[in-house]
Image (cartoon, rainbow, N blue to C red):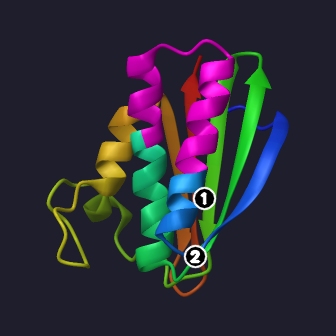
Amino acid sequence: MIPTDGVLIGIYALIGDRDVIQVRRVAGREMDHRGARTVQKTRFVTAVSEIARNVVMHGGGGEARIYMHSEPSAISVVCVDNGPGIADLDAAFSDGFSTAGSMGRGLGGARRLSDALDVETEEGKGTRVTMMARI
């Protein structure tokens, strides 16, 4: 379960690759400050990169919000876009499914690399992905 409360660390626009790198960097830095193990941090920031990149590539841009939680000790990242939405969410979680000619491991991979991941999507209105890692 992903905590719904928490301290907002920052809101970041996701327009291009530099924005993806910034969100990844901030998430990693916050995990370092709270004593996350290197493997734990690497897994989660990879998930953050995948989802943030999806916002840029498939959603036409959006934003990311990073939160820290105390009970349980965790970090969560919420990525939102106003793009076309995901028509078939089950297929989108399958390895090899891609609408962009990529390897198609982003959404499923991000779920495997996070302690929790939730997707809300509606065709024509956009997608919201919330992911969390316990620290």
**Mark 1 closeness class: few <14, some 14–19, many ≥20 residues within 10 Å:** many
Q: Residue at x 49, y 47 (%)?
A: 48
Asked if marks 2 and 1 touch (Cβ < 8 Å), the reply is: no
Q: Quadrant of the N terminus?
A: top right
The residue lying toward the viewer, choosing from 133 and 19, is 19
Q: Which residue is mark 2?
A: 15
Taking the magenta stretch, the answer to whether it contains residue 34 is yes
Q: Is residue 121 left or right of residue 75?
A: left
Query: Which residue is outermost to the front?
Result: 18
Taking the magenta stretch, the answer to whether it contains residue 36 is yes
**Res. 107 mark:** none
Q: Is residue 129 left or right of residue 41?
A: right
Residue 101 % position (x, y): 17, 77
Name the secondary structure under disc 1: strand
Q: Is residue 64 left or right of residue 43?
A: right
Q: Which residue is mark 1?
A: 79
- Work out how far the residue at label 2 is from the one at label 1, CA to CA, in angstroms: 12 Å
Residue 16 % position (x, y): 51, 74
Asked if residue 130 is positioned above or below residue 11 in the image, the reply reads above
What amino acid does circle 1 point to? Cys
Q: Main secondary structure of the magenta part?
A: helix
Asked if residue 118 is positioned above or below residue 97 in the image, the reply reads above
Q: Quadrant of the C terminus?
A: top right
Highlighted magenta segment, given as a residue range: 23-45
Residue 64 % position (x, y): 66, 58
